[in-house]
Amino acid sequence: MIPVLDLKREYQELKDEIDAAVSRVLASGGFVGGAEVEALEGELAAYLEVPHIITLGSGTDALFIALRAMGLGPGDEVITSPFTFIATIEAIQHVGATPVLVDIDPQTFNLDPQGLGAALTPRTRAILPVHLYGQAAPMQAIVEFAQAHRLSVLEDAAQAIGARYCSQGAGPAWQRVGTIGMAGAFSLYPTKNLGAYGDAGFIATRSPAIAEESRLIASHGQAARYHHVRPAGYTSRLDALQAAILRVKLPHLEAWNARRRAIAHAYSEGLKGVVQTPYEAPYALHIFHQYTIRHPQRDRLAEHLKARGIGSSVHYPLPAHLQPAYRDLAPEGSLPEAERAAREVLSLPMHPFLEEAQLEAVLEAVRSFG
């Protein structure tokens, strides 16, 4: 069986370094926060070229805490994508705000900025674009719209650590996603391009105020031990063990992302004219958290691959507004591109340890689908 992801292989590649890092933490007796977490925050800040990193217990926490730190709450509306992992929607609701859904661009699967105007109301306070599958959303159009209407922008970069966006005109040519808006929320779940061995996440921001508020919220609203200055605080902390493991992995991230891009390009070349392969926007450096094709007979294709020992996944089989818990967000048929994508997308095996023979086996299996 060729799996979609091979975390066992990743561990074997780094076993000695990871085992040493874990032993170091166990011997230290410090398991929450501390030197390992502080060091990781500094290393992530250097990698992303951003001054403030706040490590947390998950990517969901990063979204929720960042929204709270940005001042979002009851009565507010946040524009976002219906085609995303449900944590994007949950985080908006957890702060008491209302998600407002805008349909996706069928090529990139990301929020289509042409729909922003129709979604705007007097209650709109923020836009939450998702960099889905590892490709940047069209941030220039989103940020310009936000600035024109005095809206905040929080980037959901859960799947996109290391991806870049190229703005047009003035400003830096290439920027890391998650550093373009007021803040970015990242997931370090084990399956991500940079993954912990458990739940983990972080917020990246250039704003000292958002950074300070995020740290307060994540630590029970306390400015010092047992001195609580914010009501309704929360607890979300990164374990030192996870930080130590992530510090081993982070130096490999650029090479791993480059390998993912090479695999993706080989897939796209080998599947040209067979299925609809991923579109790479000219403004984006895609890091292929997922390599996701489209096919009108997606379920039959998945069964065909399974019969030939090829793993595949569907990200995601239902857009947010068709989930049983969220049918009040928008009526069926109102977001046609997200609905069509949910019927057609299929993710093929994608990880930096995929061997050439495995890649060829995947290509041959897809091409043999009649």
Image: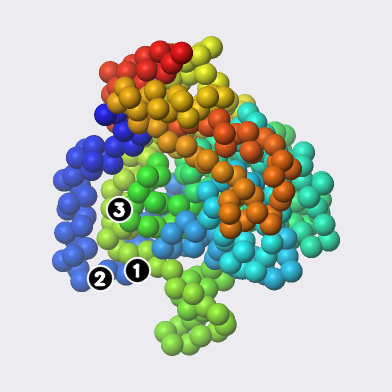
Q: Residue at x 53, y 48 (%)?
A: 85
Q: Residue at x 28, y 56 (%)?
A: 244
User: Which secondary structure, mark 3?
Assistant: loop
- Density class for disc 2 (Cα within 10 Å; few <14, some 14-19, many ≥20) is some
Q: Are marks 1 and 2 in contact (CB under 8 Å)?
A: yes
In the drawing, what numbered circle is on residue 33? 1
Q: Nearer the viewer, residue 70 or 112?
A: 112
| Residue at disc 2, secondary structure | loop
Assess whether mark 3 and mark 1 are in contact (beta carbons under 8 angstroms): no
- How far apart marks 1 and 3 lie (CA) works out to 16 Å
Is residue 90 visible in the rendered image? The answer is yes
Q: Is residue 1 left or right of residue 168?
A: left
Q: Distance from label 1 to label 2 (Cα)?
A: 8 Å
Please say whether residue 179 is visible from this viewpoint. no
The x and y percentages for residue 359 are: 34, 21
Q: Residue 100, how many percent across, how many down?
A: 71, 54
Spot occupied by residue 136 in the image (x, y as percentages of width and height): 58, 38
Q: Quadrant of residue 264?
A: top left
Residue 44's place in the image compared with 353, above or below, is below
Instruction: Tell which residue pokes out farthest to the bottom in this image.
Output: 226
The kind of residue tagged 1 is Gly
Identify the residue under disc 3: 197
Residue 59: x, y in percent? 47, 56
**For the residue marked with disc 2, what is the amino acid?**
Gly
The residue lying at 78 percent from left, 50 percent from top is: 119
Q: Name the residue carrying label 2.
A: 30
| Front: mark 1 or 3 | 3
